[in-house]
Image (spheres, grey):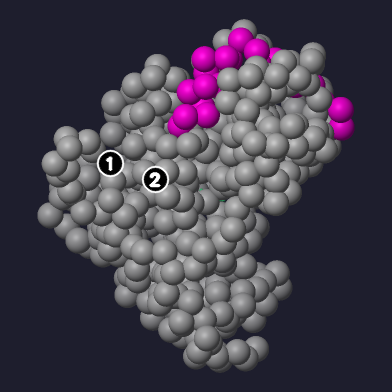
Amino acid sequence: MADIKFYSGESFPLEMHKVCIVQKLNLLPIEQRRIAIDEAGNNTFLLKNRDVYLDMLTDSGVNAMSDRQQAAMLVADDSYAGSETFFRLERVIQDIFGTRFFLPAHQGRACENIIAQVFVKPGTVVATNYHFTTTKAHVTLNGGSIEEIYKADALEITSDKPFKGDIDLEKLRALIQRQGAEQIAFVRIEAGTNLIGGQPVSLANMRDVHQLCQKHGIPLVLDASLLADNLYFNKLREPECRDMSLREITRTMAGLCDLIYFSARKLGCARGGGMCMNSEEIYKRIRDKIVLYEGFLTYGGMSVREIEAIAVGLEETMDMDMISQGPQFIRFMVEQLVEKGIPVITPPGGLGCHLDAGAFLPHLSQAQYPAGALAAALYLVSGVRGMERGTLSEQRNADGSERYSDMELLRLALPRRVFTMSQVKYAIDRIVWLYEHRALVGGLRFVEEPELLRFFFGRLAPTSDWQDRLVAQFRTDLGDSL
Ligand code: F0G
C-alpha cells in the first residue's frame, strides 16, 4: 500500500484497489441480534450470515478476488486428467517457490491429513512453533504428538518482538537429544502463526532451524497458509529482507524446506490447497495418497475454476500493494484500540486483530469461557462476528477435566480487501463501548457439548441474565433503529 502522508496529519492506510462487485449487508437492531445469538447457542459459528453485519469469523475462503482472478475462472479447462488449468498452476508454483513438484489437495487440512499419514508413526513427535487446530488433530489421529517449541516471548500478549513466531533453537536441540532424531516425524514451521495472533517467523530463524534439521536428518515442513502476511513482515521488519523482492524471500524460504503446504483459502485468495517439494521420494509417497483421498493429480478435489483463481492469486501475492492491505488495516485497528487502553495482542500481526478476552473480562474465570462470552457480547452490541480462540477451542483432557488454553482470545479476522475503513471504524467504536461496559458481561456454560471439535457445534447459554442487561444498556446509549 502506498505510504501516503496526509496534509491533515492523520495516519491511516490507503486502499490500492477499487471495489467492482458489492454484496448487500444487513445490520439488525440489537433486539433481533439477541434472538439470533440465542438461536445460535451463543456460538458465533452457528450464526446465519444474514444476521451478521461484519463477518470477522475468519479470512478463510472469504478474501475478495481480483478482476483478473474472476476473468481467469471463465477460461478454465475442465477434465479429469491432464487439465491445462492444472499445468498453469503448477508452473506458477514452480516459479514462485522454485520447487520441482506440485501436488493439489482440496484445502489445507487435506494436505495435513496426508502429510500426517506419510510422516507420523505412533509415538513420534511433530515439533512446531505453535500448533494449529487441524494440524494437531491429524498428528494425534496418527498416533503422534505435538511439541511446541516457541520462544519464551511468543505468548506475551503485549510485546514489541517483531517475530514472535520464531522457533526456540535450544528447545529444538533439547528435544532432539531427549527423543532422538528418528523419533521426530518432522519440524513444522507455521508462517504467520495463527493461534498466537498471526505472528510472523523470520527468515533468519528458518535458516537456523533448517541447519539443525539437516544435521539430524529431520524433514522441515512449512505451513505457508499465512505466508502472504509473513512476507509483508519479513520485508518490513527484517533487515536482510529489505532489499530482497518478495519472490526472492519466498524462494529463499522454500529452499530451506523439504515440504511446503498451504490452504489456498488463505494464500492466493481462492479455495483449495496444495503441497510442493523438491524430493522425488517425498513426492511419490504423497502422490499415492492424493489419488486416494483427493482425486486425480490434475485437480486434487478442487474445481478447475478455483485452480485458475489460485494461479492468478498467487502471482498477485508477490506484490507489496496486495499483501500489505490486511496487515495495515490490522495495525490501524490495533493502534486505535491500544490508544483506548483495550487489551489486544501486540505487535499487530496478520490475519486479524486479537482481543485479549482474559484481560478484557478479568472478572470471569477460564471456566466461564471469557473469549466465548466476549464473542457473543460483541455480536450483540455490533453485529460483528468474531471467532473464539480460547478454552472453548481446546479439547477436554482424557479424564474429562477442562484443558485451559494458553490465551483467551477473540479473533476479529480481516479478510483481505473486504472491509472498508468506515466499517473498521464502526467495529472499533462498538468494541470501545463494550469495553466501557465490560462489567455487564457475564460467562457462558455448555448446554450441548460435542466430544470432538466442540467449538464448531457446541451450544452454550449465559450463566445469568447479563445479556438482557447488556441489551438494555445499549438501547439506552446507542439504540439503533428498530
Ligand atoms: N494451517 C493454518 C495456519 C490455518 O490457519 C488453517 C486454517 C489451516 C492450516 C487449514 O486450512 O481451512 O484450508 O483446511 N485456518 C482457518 C482459520 C480455518 O479460520 O484460521 P483449511
Please, what is the three-letter code of the amino acid marked with disc 1? Phe
Residue drawn at 65 percent across, 73 percent down: 301
Residue 437 lies in the magenta-colored region: yes
Q: Residue 1, relative to residue 72: is it above or below?
A: above
Query: Residue 241: x percent and y percent?
Result: 19, 50
Where disc 1 sits, the SS reads loop
Front residue (pair 168, 80) = 80
| Quadrant for the C terminus in the image | top right
Residue 119 position, x and y percent, is: 58, 55
The spot of residue 337 in percent (x, y) is 40, 26
Callout 2, which amino acid?
Met
Asked if the residue at tag 1 contacts the one at tag 2, i.e. Cβ–Cβ closer than 8 Å, the answer is yes
Q: Determine which residue is flagged by label 1.
A: 12
Residue 221 visible here = no
Residue 136 in magenta?
Answer: no
Residue range highlighted in magenta:
428-448
Q: CA distance from mark 2 to mark 1?
A: 9 Å
Q: Nearer the viewer, residue 369 or 239?
A: 369
410 or 338: which is nearer to us? 338
In this rendering, the answer to whether 354 lies above or below 373 is: below
Answer left or right for 465 relative to 252: right
Where's the N terminus, which quadrant? bottom left
Quick one: label 2 or label 1, which is nearer the N terminus? 1
Residue 338: % across, % down:
37, 23
